[in-house]
Image: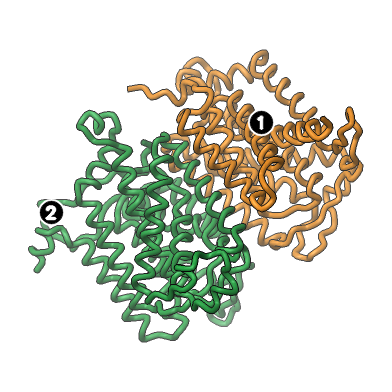
Amino acid sequence: MTAALQYLFDALSLGSLYALGALGIALIFGVMRLVNFAHGDVMTFAIFVLIAPTTEAVAPLWVGAWATPLIVLTVLGVGAALAVLAELAVFRHLRHATPATTMMAAFALGFVIQNLLLALHSSRAKAVNLWPQLNLPVDLWGARVPALQMLMIGITMALLVGLAWMLRHTRAGLEMRAAAEDFDMARMLGVKANRVILVAFGMSGALAALIGLFMVNQTGLVDIRMGAPMMLVAFVSTVIGGLGSLMGAVLGGFLIGFVSTALQAWLPLDARAFRDAFVYLGVIALLLWRPNGLFITGASRQRV
Amino acid sequence: MKNFLLRHRLETPVLLCLALALLAVLSLAGSNSLQRTTTEVLIRVVMVVGMFIFIGHSGLISFGHMAFVGIGAYGVAWTTMEPSIKQYVLTGLPDLLQQAALPWVPASLLAGLLAAAVALLAGAVILRLNGIAASIATFSLLAIFNVVYSNWDSVTAGSSSIVGIPTPVGVWQAFLFAAGAIALAHWHGISRFGLALRAVREEPVAARSCGINAWRQLLVAFVLSALVCGLGGALDAQFLGVVNPDAYYLGRTFTCLTMLVIGGSASLSGAVTGVLVLSALMELLIRLETGVSLGGMAIQLPSGSQEVVTGLVMVLTLIRRPAGLMQGREWQWPRLTHPSAPLPAASLEMQPR
């Protein structure tokens, strides 16, 4: 029973991480039809401000040494700022390009950011001890769950509720939903395209930075390659949830989190290293059954 | 001669092969390192032409072709290495492979066929998805390849590379395969498969109403492109003598996609031009990184700037000139009059399906 509870919390926390990542991708895709391949690298950049840029093996803390609320605000702010900068510098000029072109541009941008970090910090993983008290286990109905996992699940739930409220009850949310449904019509009705897109990018960047903070706390490392696996799972979650659907992206993220944890628990020991391969194979199998994802939105329906 | 070439539509591949042959001949007059660089360029031509066969005609971006390159590279490692080394390092290989020590040409062809077989299975599944979902599925294909090959230690030696592959590949061997790849890509492009696939790219619904089965055409192109990419991987392994799963992952994917995009993904000449131009740029940047003296001043770019500049060039190209350098045109002999039978017109940008 306690083992099952342990696995449940593992699955929920992993699922919330993936769901946040998928949400960041889906926000931008919904508004702009752009698959943001640079999302993982925005996350990595945001958490690298925690340490000072140096190619030494041990990096002194920079933002990481400040007070906790300041750290959180700064890292989230850097993530949002980088995403907004990417939109202003690159994606704004590609507003009317084909999805393939924008995908490639995002891929290239991600590559540039990753190599900038490589030049500044070298490819070594640097140790960062951020909030060690969060890794202490909390006793919950017999299961010992790290406090960080509880925090992750709690914050994700709060964010999802807050986002749903924002989308439904605020002007900015209304504009985003309108832009996601029919961009040109929304513009004709007075929605300022640039502002909606900037808000989407800012939110996406902040979400990426939040995931980064969780990952740093969990692993204790910052590494330029941290973004790639997270990014891939985020894309895949968005695709299985249905491109353009925020709810689908979140559910896709949780689904992959649950399947990943289940495989981790049930696979024989020598097959555990291939867990990710099985997850992706499962995703491809799901896509065979439902090619347009679980929640089909108007975005994916073909108009002939 | 010119009429013969024009009538059989051989003008473009002949011109491309002549240019590559010129490059090969010039390199032979240079130093050993120049020859190694030229061999690398020719191997990249094979890989990028392979990617073009699918990406160019279908308009779908595939991030997963490096998986086929890697499958080809490991395939050739399994069949050409000394059996005595394989017995110690790759204990999980079946006996047939462990005893095999094939000459390099059959081994390369077999490795290419292995990649094509995997593409047949994977493509049959992935190509049912629509545009963006298919691209992301190819990305996950690359991830699957990386995870499997990095962890299957008994068969692939995992993240510690396989060392000791015989290296018979030099400038001329690579040129031979590059010419073959160009011939294959050209043949596919002018055949009914290429035409049907381009029709699917331009107007999927109209193409379907003409009786074209989009999935089948995509699959044909996917398998053919995997074959050529597998051959490129086989050459790569037999040039370096070392294979490692991380060499066929995101970095290489990005480099090859950049070459394709900068040259112009809609035409074969675009693919080759992209390789030549970007290889020259990358060489220049690497030389600048190691430091060069120009008129008395020593210029040295900070390390890592080669990738950053390459990425920025790619972004700028996509913003300014998304159809690349060749803009869908092919290399042709300069004409005074309008050509009577131009090569099939290609759309300017990568189009979604």
Residue B302 in the image: above or below residue A249: below
Q: Is residue A133 above or below residue B261?
A: above
Looking at the image, which is closer to me, A123 or B263? A123
Give the CA distance from mark 1 to mark 2: 58 Å
Chain A colour in the picture: orange
Report which quarter residue B226 is drawn in. bottom left
Q: Does residue A259 appear in this view?
A: yes
Chain in green?
Answer: B
Task: Give me the residue at 68% from left, 50% from top.
Answer: A226
**For mark 2, what is the residue?**
B339
| Percent position of residue B353, x then y | 36, 36
A75 displayed left or right of A293: right
Q: Pick whichever, B297 or A166, lies toward us.
A: A166
Question: Are the residues tagged 1 and 2 within 8 Å (C-beta)?
Answer: no
Residue A254, label in figure:
1
Same chain letter for marks 1 and 2:
no
Q: Dot 2 falls on which chain?
A: B
